[in-house]
Image: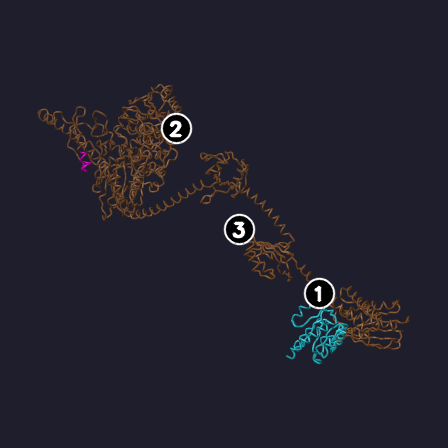
Chain colours: A brown, B cyan
């Protein structure tokens, strides 16, 4: 809570009554215009003194006094040196000076801070708050946050804060900062601000009167506080009365209520007012390192001690009443500084607690106006704060160790096991009881020997024995508890809020309105006959009197009182007072001796009877006083003589009366005091009762609280861990956003910008200040008119959208949109990413072209009829073209992946695969002939060329081959044919040689030799001719016969009869057969049938089967020929008989001529003539 | 004419020569030439005849056509080799040389061979065989 009461009440009183109300005004950029408008609207006779502070260029003369002088008829003065403030004057700040209050005088002094860190508005406001206590603070248009601290100070001192509506202000930053402090009472446009200010000044006069008056309706005040307690849960009845009264007075000004009663009504009608009053009561001002000498003392005598022990595991500090956190952060900073001086670093935990939730929010945020520069050293600013715009933010390091909690010191269980408690300027607001209770609470919360630091005018000496004073100036105490003490019980706290308002007796003011009944008649008649009487309450106030009682009344002079003692005739007063006293104090009724009372000259004896009206009430709450009147007494009653005769008695009587009247006064006073004591006692007892029950409750719940406390600590540390994770994630995110070189844009569901990376600024003309504005407001560089439509589509369908879009700068972007899903899977906008894909597209295009070319080239190779294939040197076949498919018979699918040598059963003639491989590795290529096997088993001979290519980590072999099998076979065959030809020629030549020799042996003359030899040679040639015609397959028997016989019969058609089935004689038979036929024909021509013109020759043959073989039977039949000479020894006959291998030849002659049969077994039909 | 020694006696007198040749004319010619040189010639046109003749007639030498009909002379050559009877291959075919390589000591005459060459071949054959037989 820090200092809730900076101003001295005595001095305030003076300011209120003797001095003009002060209006301090702060303005900056755009402020001159606002000031002009303000003074235009401000009457000149308000009686207030206006002090105007603006930010001025130190080097230039200010024109402000002249400008303002044109707007108001009040005197406008530039403050020089020191000046007394007067009403209806305007005081203006001079350049390069600051204004401050010094004893009701305004003074201009030089700045202590360097330029750029000055905040003259705060300075003035703070000094006004300090010196005058209250006043009016006005913040007008301006940039920055100057004044934000000042208004809090003014407000805390009881002043009223007026702020120009930021919407109207030319520069809204200063008004906004002031509003952000939460202390602004009125936020209005300048003109209305001026009007309200006039009202407020007028009201202030009134409220000052109220404040000064001792006659406060206590009942009403109690009701107001009770109402506040019910509404807000905070009980201020134990707070210092003066403070409370002043706050209420301030609220009355703001709500424009003149009377406390009116304010109470307003409070009841308007629920917000309770909270406004609460926040006024809680308003507090604090600064960093307030009272620096106290902090120095704290550092040297306490904080260094906390770190001295190596065994210390943690240092826990509780800053009670931390308000907006400055005190807590100050302590935390000192702890961190101290920790850095020690090797041993215990965990540090600072708790900041306060009633005011709003102040705590500010505290947790840790953001303070730049004006804190005044209180925090540059070194600390650098180390523990980060500059954020015109604010300073406490670094995460410090915020991490400080924990803020809403906590009522008087009501809530305290933090426990704390090493140090700082609670400054809180106790002063509490009454003594509450102070003692809080001290007890602190003692409970502290570890044995723990420290307590209080404010300058506070002490922890009651109740005694809890704390020992360490330093008087700094108000540092140490707990007297030592280790091993039995833990003290938690002192009783104020119980839960309960309405303890005195119930007002409802029936008291009501008069009976019953009809006139018999009972009434009876009562009235009784009244008539009974002695006059008066009903009084215990304060002797007349409550009711009978109609006839007026006779005995004779009020004393002065103001009319309702006190019966003052009302009755003077003769009766003494007796009545003592009788009443007896009744109320002791409960005894009284009947007095007769008193002489003079009525209209006659003296009557009157008895007074005082008794309680009801029964059982002790002491009674009311009394009935009855006047019983006797007969008139003669004037010469002895008594009169008595007083006439004795002067001394008269004197004594006068003295007695004097004494009596003195006694009366004393008794009255004593009564009043008694009364108060009784009331107080009563209340105390009831409270005590409550305390006792509460205490019991607390006793039982203490354990629970402690365990809950433990739990809370665990939860807290978990939360802290989580917070760390979150902040790490946050900084990761920040870095990610900064590091990515593609644009990311976050939009909310209304298409407003939430966040974006730098790259987005290249595409959209946005700046960080544009966050929150709809994206549709911005022009972009993209050829993408459907952007908005797509974003909406993503929001509607939740389906991501992806496009490639060209920018006006001819770059391409891959734009992706997807819905933004929160962690709980709600859709909250759209995330758009822009990835520059220009380079990628270019590369892709090039790649596509290459690919196409490659594809074409590959296609050509694939389609080539030349067998080409590629295999991995360390693996199988990779490529297999059409040529290969055709040559080897394996399809591409069959071949790929197989090892080529294995698949094709490759053999390297006159070498080996190993040698081939070696050469391939050594020279990179190999050329030669390979034998390979096709799929159908054909052996292939190929001329192959192998090239080894190293492609990155693969060794590929390109093998192209040419099929030379056919050529090789042809060559082979040619070779064979040549051999066969040689063979035949040689054979034939050998045969010719034999024919020649044999013919020569058997010839008788050279002529005969020539004839016979040439005939035989021709026969041989003819047979050969037929064989050649048939490609050496064989010779047709019919054709052979015809050829051999033709030369011997000129008219062959008639004389030759050749008949038989088609028979193909194999080559080895054809030649001898031809020779045999030739010899037969020669003989026939020489000696047989053909030697005569009439003879003819029949050659017939037939085929028959025998034992599955074919038998040829040929018959040569000559007819009409001469009987030939027997010639069986000649060569001809030998040939006929023996030339045909395996043939049986029979010859026989009859009358017709020669008949010759040749029978032979035909070999199997020749399959392949050439092979033979 | 040929086939006679310088002394005028038949050079192959006393020798029994087996001639195996499927061509009758060639067989006749060989027989004529060898007989003229004084040899007794056993003519065979088939392998079967030849094998039988070896058993019955115990030739001292032989002249063999390599191809007989559709088969080869190999069985005959093998039998002759077993009996250590020297023989000459008479062939018109160059390629036959390969199949004859199993009988390296057998002489080969190429068709057509003049009668003198034929005779002198046998003379040499028998002379070289003589010491082996008796030594």
Pointer 3 with pointer 2, Cβ within 8 A: no
- Range of the magenta residues? A579-589
Q: What element carries label 3?
A: loop
- Residue A375, position in %: x, y? 31, 33
How far is disc 3 from disc 1 in space, using C-alphas? 55 Å
Which image quarter: residue A404? top left
Pointer 3 with pointer 1, Cβ within 8 A: no
Q: Decide if residue B64 is on the left or right side of residue A456.
A: right
Q: Magenta stretch: residue A92 in it?
A: no
Which residue carries the number 1 mark?
A979
Mark 1, residues whose alpha carbon is within 10 Å: few (<14), some, or many (≥20)? some
Q: Quadrant of the C terminus of chain A?
A: bottom right
Q: Which of marks 3 and 2 is nearer the N terminus?
A: 2
| Residue drawn at point x = 39 percent, y = 28 percent | A142
In front here: A519 or A666?
A666
Q: Residue A142 carries which label?
A: 2
Q: Which mark is residue A952?
A: 3
Q: Which chain carries label 3?
A: A
Which image quarter: residue A937? bottom right
């Amino acid at each position: 809570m820090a200092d809730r009461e900076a101003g001295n009440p005595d001095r305030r009183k003076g300011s209120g009554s003797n001095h003009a109300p002060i209006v301090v005004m702060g303005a900056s950029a755009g402020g001159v215009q606002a000031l002009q408008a303000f003074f235009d609207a401000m009457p000149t006779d308000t009686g207030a003194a206006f002090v105007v502070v603006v930010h001025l260029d130190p080097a230039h003369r200010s024109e402000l006094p002249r400008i303002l002088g044109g707007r108001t008829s009040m005197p406008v003065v530039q403050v020089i040196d020191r000046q007394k403030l007067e009403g209806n004057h305007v005081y203006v700040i001079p350049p390069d000076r600051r204004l401050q209050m010094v004893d009701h005088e305004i003074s201009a002094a030089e700045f202590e801070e360097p330029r750029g860190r000055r905040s003259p508005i705060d300075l003035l406001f703070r000094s006004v708050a300090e010196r005058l206590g209250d006043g009016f603070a006005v913040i007008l248009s301006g940039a920055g946050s100057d004044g934000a601290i000042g208004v809090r100070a003014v407000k805390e001192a009881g002043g009223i804060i007026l702020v120009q509506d930021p919407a109207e202000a030319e520069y809204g930053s200063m008004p906004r900062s002031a509003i952000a402090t939460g202390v602004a009472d009125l936020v209005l446009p300048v003109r209305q601000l001026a009007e309200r200010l006039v009202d407020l000044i007028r009201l202030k006069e009134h409220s000052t009167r109220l404040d000064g008056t001792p006659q406060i309706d206590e009942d009403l005040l109690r009701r107001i506080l009770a109402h506040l307690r019910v509404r807000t849960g905070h009980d201020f009845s134990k707070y210092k009365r003066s403070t409370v009264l002043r706050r209420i007075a301030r609220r009355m000004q703001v709500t424009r209520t003149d009377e406390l009663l009116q304010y109470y009504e307003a409070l009841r009608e308007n629920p917000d007012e309770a909270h406004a009053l609460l926040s006024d009561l809680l308003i507090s001002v604090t600064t960093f390192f307030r009272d620096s000498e106290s902090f120095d003392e704290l550092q040297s005598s306490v904080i260094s001690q906390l770190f001295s022990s190596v065994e210390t595991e943690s240092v826990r500090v509780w800053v009670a009443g931390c308000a907006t956190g400055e005190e807590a952060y100050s302590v935390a900073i000192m702890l961190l500084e101290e920790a850095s001086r020690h090797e041993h670093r215990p965990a540090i935990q600072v708790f900041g607690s306060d009633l005011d939730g709003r102040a705590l929010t500010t505290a947790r945020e840790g953001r303070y106006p730049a004006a804190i520069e005044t209180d925090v050293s540059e070194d600390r600013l650098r180390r523990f704060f980060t500059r954020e715009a015109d604010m300073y933010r406490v670094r995460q390091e410090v915020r991490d160790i400080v924990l803020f909690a809403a906590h009522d010191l008087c009501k809530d269980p305290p933090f426990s096991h704390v090493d140090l408690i700082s609670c400054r300027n809180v106790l002063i607001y509490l009454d003594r009881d509450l102070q003692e209770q809080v001290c007890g609470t602190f003692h409970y919360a502290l570890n044995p020997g723990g420290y307590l630091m209080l404010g300058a005018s506070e002490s922890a000496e009651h109740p005694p024995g809890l704390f020992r004073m360490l330093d008087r100036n700094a108000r540092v105490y140490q707990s007297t508890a030592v280790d091993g003490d039995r833990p003290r019980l938690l002192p009783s706290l104020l119980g839960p809020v309960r309405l303890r308002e005195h119930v007002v007796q409802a029936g008291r003011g009501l008069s009976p309105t019953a009809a006139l009944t018999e009972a009434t008649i009876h009562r009235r008649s009784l009244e008539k006959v009974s002695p006059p009487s008066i009903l009084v309450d215990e304060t002797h106030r007349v409550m009711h009197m009978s109609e006839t009682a007026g006779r005995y009344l004779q009020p004393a002079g002065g103001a009319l009182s309702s006190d019966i003692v003052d009302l009755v005739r003077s003769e009766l007063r003494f007796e009545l007072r003592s009788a009443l006293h007896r009744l109320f104090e002791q409960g005894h009724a009284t009947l007095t001796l007769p008193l002489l009372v003079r009525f209209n000259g006659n003296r009557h004896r009157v008895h007074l009877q005082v008794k309680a009206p009801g029964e059982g009430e002790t002491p009674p709450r009311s009394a009935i006083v009855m006047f019983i009147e006797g007969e008139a007494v003669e004037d010469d009653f002895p008594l009169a003589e008595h007083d006439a005769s004795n002067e001394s008695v008269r004197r004594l009587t006068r003295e007695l009366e004097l004494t009596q009247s003195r006694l009366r006064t004393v008794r009255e006073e004593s009564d009043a005091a008694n009364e108060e004591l009784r009331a107080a006692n009563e209340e105390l007892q009831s409270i005590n009762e409550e305390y006792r029950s509460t205490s019991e409750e607390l006793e039982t719940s203490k354990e629970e609280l402690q365990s809950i406390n433990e739990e809370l600590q665990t939860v807290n540390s978990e939360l802290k861990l989580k917070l760390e994770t979150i902040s790490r994630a946050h900084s990761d995110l920040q870095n990610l956003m900064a590091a990515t070189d593609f644009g990311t844009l976050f939009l909310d569901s209304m298409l407003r910008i939430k966040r974006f990376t730098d790259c987005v600024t290249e595409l959209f003309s946005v700046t960080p200040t544009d966050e929150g504005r709809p994206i549709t407001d911005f022009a972009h560089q993209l050829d993408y008119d459907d952007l908005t439509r797509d974003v909406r589509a993503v929001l509607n369908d939740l389906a991501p959208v992806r496009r490639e879009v060209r920018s006006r700068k001819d770059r391409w972007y891959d734009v992706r949109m997807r819905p933004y899903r929160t962690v709980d899977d709600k859709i909250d906008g759209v995330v758009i990413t822009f990835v520059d894909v220009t380079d990628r597209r270019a590369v892709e295009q090039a790649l596509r072209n290459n690919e196409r070319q490659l594809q074409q080239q590959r296609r050509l190779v694939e389609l080539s009829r030349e067998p080409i294939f590629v295999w991995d040197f360390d693996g199988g076949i990779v490529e297999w073209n059409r040529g290969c498919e055709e040559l080897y018979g394996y399809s591409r699918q069959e071949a790929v992946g197989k090892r080529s040598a294995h698949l094709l059963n490759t053999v390297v003639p006159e070498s080996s695969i190993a040698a081939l491989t070696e050469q391939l590795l050594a020279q990179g290529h190999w050329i030669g002939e390979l034998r390979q096997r096709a799929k159908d088993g054909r052996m292939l001979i190929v001329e192959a060329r192998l090239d080894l290519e190293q492609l990155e980590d693969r060794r590929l072999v390109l093998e192209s081959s040419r099929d030379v099998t056919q050529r090789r076979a042809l060559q082979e065959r040619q070779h064979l044919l040549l051999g066969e030809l040689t063979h035949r020629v040689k054979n034939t030549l050998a045969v010719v040689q034999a024919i020649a020799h044999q013919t020569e042996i058997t010839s008788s003359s050279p002529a005969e030799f020539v004839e016979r030899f040439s005939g035989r040679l021709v026969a041989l040639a003819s047979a050969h001719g037929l064989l050649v015609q048939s490609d050496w397959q064989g010779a047709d028997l019919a054709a052979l016969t015809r050829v051999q016989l033709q030369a011997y019969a000129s008219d062959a058609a008639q004389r030759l009869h050749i008949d038989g089935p088609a028979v193909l004689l194999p080559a080895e038979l054809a030649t001898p057969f031809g020779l045999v036929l030739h010899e037969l024909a020669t003989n026939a021509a020489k000696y047989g049938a053909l030697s005569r013109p009439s003879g003819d020759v029949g050659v017939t043959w037939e085929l028959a089967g025998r034992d599955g073989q074919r038998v040829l039977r040929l018959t040569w039949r000559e007819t009409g020929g001469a009987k030939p000479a027997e010639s069986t020894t000649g060569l001809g006959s030998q040939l006929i008989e023996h030339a045909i291998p395996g043939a049986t030849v029979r010859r026989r002659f009859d009358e017709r001529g020669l008949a010759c049969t040749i029978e032979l077994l035909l070999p199997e039909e020749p399959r392949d003539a050439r092979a033979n | 004419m040929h086939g006679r020694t310088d002394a005028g006696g038949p050079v192959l007198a006393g020798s029994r020569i087996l001639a195996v040749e499927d061509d009758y004319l060639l067989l006749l010619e060989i027989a004529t030439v060898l007989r003229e040189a004084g040899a007794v010639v056993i003519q065979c046109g088939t392998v079967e005849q030849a094998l039988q003749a070896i058993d019955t007639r115990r030739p001292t030498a032989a002249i063999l056509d390599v191809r007989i009909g559709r088969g080869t002379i190999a069985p005959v050559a093998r039998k002759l080799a077993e009996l250590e009877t020297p023989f000459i291959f008479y062939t018109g075919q160059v390629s036959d040389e390969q199949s004859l390589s199993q009988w390296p000591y057998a002489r080969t005459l190429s068709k057509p061979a003049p009668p003198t060459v034929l005779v002198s071949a046998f003379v040499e054959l028998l002379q070289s065989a003589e010491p082996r037989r008796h030594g």
